[in-house]
Image (tube, rainbow, N blue to C red):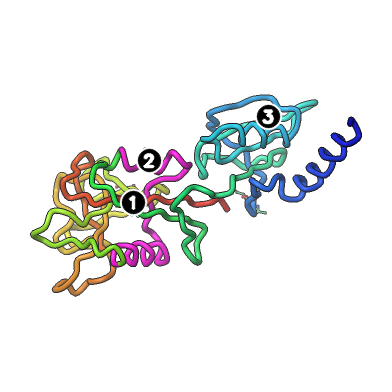
Amino acid sequence: MARVTWLFVSLFWTVTTAIHTAKFFAPDNKTKQILNPFVQLNARSALHCSMACLDRMNCFTYSVTKGSGSVDCRLSSTYDPQRILNSDSSFYYREVTAAGYNPVPGTLSYVRTVVDRTKDWPHAEADCETVGGRLAVDNNQQIHDYISQAIVALGIYAHPAQYYGYFWIGGYSSTDYLHWRLLDGTTVNITGPGTGPFHASEPEAGTNCLEIAVYPVPDPTCCSAKWGGDMCNWISWTSGYFCEIKIPN
Ligand SMILES: *[C@@H]1O[C@H](CO)[C@@H](O)[C@H](O)[C@H]1NC(C)=O
Ligand SMILES: *[C@@H]1O[C@H](CO)[C@@H](O)[C@H](O)[C@H]1NC(C)=O
């Protein structure tokens, strides 16, 4: 029996040293250490650290740092934790298996479309975070096209006179309606309504959370989505939100 057990461990180890485990992947640049883990422990080996992550539903990445006799095992509840270069460390991320997330071609992102009229921006963001993600960051053409097409496919458009059709995305303002910060840290500053990625009548002064909408005819911008702003706790115009899991590179 001892021999059989050893054989199993040995095979498992052989497999896991190649890709760590079937459930985790190493990014291109993996010599990174997680800075703000939600769990930090001494593990006997990298394998034990990966098992500690697997044991926790809300662990999506981990790093192991070589020590003497054990490893510093750090677990994070996001796919994009703060991390620093450390040549004694290895960083791994969990396979994306969350329901509803589809890969966006040409990117490292998976996006989920949620139709839900009941969530304000903070609650929508909290929902995305339960699977290690965030509200979607609309700062590349592929993600933008994916979101635009998803809204068109749903047929949930914004009309100037109809109070729905707006979907929360990952950005907010902590200063005024001309200065926006996306959840990946990118800043977008505009000079007034209708400038930058915003719709002609957006954003309005006093709004501080970012949303996106497709305005159909007679809007000449149809059917590429345009940004709008809304008060973060306001749900009257909300039709849903887009969550994103971006795997680390
Ligand atoms: C990994 O990232 C660090 C900075 O975070 C960089 O200095 C280093 O060159 C990168 N290594 C590779 C192999 O890309
Ligand atoms: C936007 O404005 C903020 C605050 O003034 C500034 O820190 C940031 O660098 C600006 N971003 C861009 C892209 O210009």
Q: Verify CB contact (< 8 Å) between mark 1 and mark 2.
A: yes
Residue type highlighted by circle 2: Asp
Main SS of the magenta part reads helix
Q: Verify CB contact (< 8 Å) between mark 3 and mark 2.
A: no
Quadrant where the N terminus lies?
Answer: top right
Magenta segment includes 132: yes
Which mark is drawn over residue 114?
1
Q: Residue furthest front?
A: 1
Q: Residue furthest right?
A: 3
The answer to whether residue 26 is above or below residue 83 is below
Residue situated in front as seen by the camera: 229 or 152: 152
Magenta segment includes 209: no
Instruction: Say which label, 1 or 2, has the lower sequence index.
Output: 1
Q: Which residue is mark 2?
A: 127
Instruction: Say which label, 3 or 1, has the lower sequence index.
Output: 3
The answer to whether residue 19 is above or below residue 51 is below
Residue type highlighted by circle 3: Asp
